Structures are given as C-alpha cells and as structure tokens.
Amino acid sequence: MNTPAIDLRGLRKSYGTKLVLDGIDLTVGAGTVTALLGPNGAGKTTTVHILSTLVHPDRGSASVAGFDVVRDPAGVRASIGLTGQFSAVDGLLTGEENLLVMARLRHLGAKQSKARVAELLERFDLVDAARKPLATYSGGMKRRLDLAMTLVTSPSVIFLDEPTTGLDPRSRHTMWDIVRGLVAEGTTVLLTTQYLDEADQLADRIAVLDGGRIVAEGAPAELKRLVPGGHLTLRLADAAAFDAASALLAEATADAATLTLTVPSDGGVRDVRAVLDRLDRASVEVDDLGIHSPDLDDVFFALTGRKEVSGSAPARDTKENAS
C-alpha cells in the first residue's frame, strides 16, 4: 500500500553529447498530482518518455505502479495513460471512431468497447460531436478527446505532457476540472507544464527541473517560502502622512511621487497587523494596502535566474482554440 506510483532514482539520459537528465530523483505518491515545472529543454518530456517506456534511460532506475520501466515495460504500459503535447487523434475519423479504435487496440471486446466509448463521450461532453468529423472540433474538444482516449482502460497513472498548450483560458479551466476529477477518483497524475498558474492550481507537489536536474521540490506553498520578496504596499493619504509613515517604518522603500511605501513582509496576518498597529498608534492614515506574497514566478526566477516559464497560457483568438 506504501508503494509509490512513480519512483525515479539517479535517472540519467543523454542524446549524443547533450546531457538531458543528470541524476533525477523523484517519488510520486498514489492519487496525487505532481508537476514537473521548467522551461523548454529542461528534460520534462524526456522524463515522461522514459516513464512511459518510449525511451530507455542511460543510468538509474524508474518504476511506475511498481513495474520497472526497463525490466517490465509491459506491466508499465498496462498501468498508464499518456497525453502528449500534441493531439494524437486521427483527423480522418469521428470522435466516436477514434475512441473505438483505441478501445480495440487495448483489446477490449466489441460490447465492452461500445459501452466504454459511450461512457467517455458523456463524461467529456462530446456526445453531440461524437459522429462529426474532427475538422469541426475546436482545440479544446480535441484535447478532451485526447484525454478520453488515454482513459479507455482506466489507467492508474496518467502522464499529461503540457496538456493545455495553445488552449484558450476557458478550455484550460475545463481541462483542470477534468484532472481534479480524475485525482478525486484515485488516479495519479504526473503533469509537465511551462505554466506557473497551472502547476499552482493542480499540483500537490512541484518539482522544478532546470538543466536536467531537479533544483527544488515541494508543495507550492513550501516552494514559495523558499524565496524572499514578500512585501506590503502602503499608499498614504497625503504628504504629511507619508512623511510620518516613512519615519516610523525605516525598513520601507519610499516613493514620494506616489506617496507609497513598500515594506518587507511575509504577508501573514500577524505581520500585516503589526505594521498597521504601528501606524495607527501614531494616527497615520493609510489610504490603500496591497499584499504581495512570493509566487511560483519568484521561485522559478530565484532558482534558475530566468523567467522562461509562463504565468498563464497565451490565448489565440481562433476557432481552433475555442472551447
């Protein structure tokens, strides 16, 4: 019962002279979401390809659902589902036909295939489009169909490799709700993403991958506590209040032009109350208060020195990306 759903130890992989993974250690508990967060080229997709038996590691070990990816690839494949970065659906078939083909490839009988396909079409809100050609599907619908095909055999572990890339915000939120529902049912999800908000929304734990190494790992809240940068922004009512507050809060950074002070703070209730009490005792009136806590953007920048991941996905105003 304590066997991790995914377990990596010292995982290494090179392509020619390029070292892609440099000794990865990662444990993923059953029924949880772990996000691999990092820029393009960090090794996220290579990790997923090794775990799904598409690529062999050079060194180290990896197991999924208790099966070793090298010694027992068949056991791994029987336990997993994979949704890649790009849609894997057949554009010449309807949605229903795509699902039926996948069901037969996974050796479900004709009767069981038909029942499972009907269930998945209902679950992913594709019943009305089931017998329409994929040319009529939006980007969001294709991604839902992609995930439905992954779930034909109810895998215990699912790999989602940048599943919302190119989708508009509404389609992304729909995918997030689907993932939350799967996890609530006990499915384990390993999610790779460039989007900070996606990792923050979905992941129980996050592993920050950079240059083939995991440079930090923990719950989102734990990672945010790793970096400084929390502060309060106080806007004062007038110049007299600004001068008085500046004298009281010597640790603050002052901006006289906007009558604002930036005060280092962890953003906690106790810390905020202490600052306001100091001002209140001196009868200094604050017009506006803003609280900034470190976010995953701050974490990634602090750990890697760059901001190549995105806070949110770019939305393109095209029919392809409409939900």
Image (cartoon, rainbow, N blue to C red):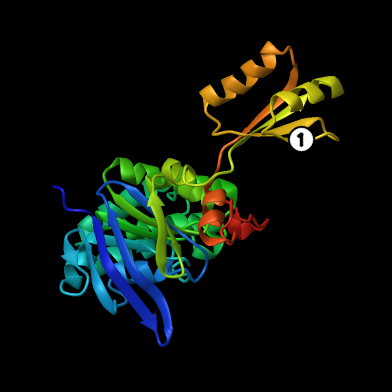
Q: Position of residue 96 (x, y in %)?
A: 38, 59
Q: Rate crowding at label 1 as few (under 14), some (14 to 19) or many (20 or more) other CA atoms within 10 Å.
A: many
Residue at image position (53%, 60%) is: 165
Position of 238 relative to 312 (above/below):
above
Q: Looking at the picture, does residue 52 appear above or below residue 15?
A: above
Q: Picture coordinates of residue 301 (x, y %)?
A: 56, 56
On screen, residue 65 versus residue 312, left or right, reads left
Q: Quadrant of residue 99?
A: bottom left
Point 37% across, 72% down: residue: 22
Direction from residue 138 to residue 89 in the image, left or right = left
Q: 120 and 293: which one is in front?
A: 293
Q: Which residue is mark 1?
A: 254
- 99 or 172, which lies in front? 172
Q: Nearer the viewer, residue 184 or 105?
A: 184
Amino acid of disc 1: Ala
Q: Position of residue 272 (x, y in %)?
A: 58, 24
Q: Quadrant of residue 17?
A: bottom left
Q: Quadrant of residue 112?
A: bottom left
The image shows a total of numbered marks equal to 1
Q: Secondary structure at mark 1?
A: strand
Is 85 left or right of 14, judged from the image as shown? right
Q: Residue at x 28, y 42 (%)?
A: 185
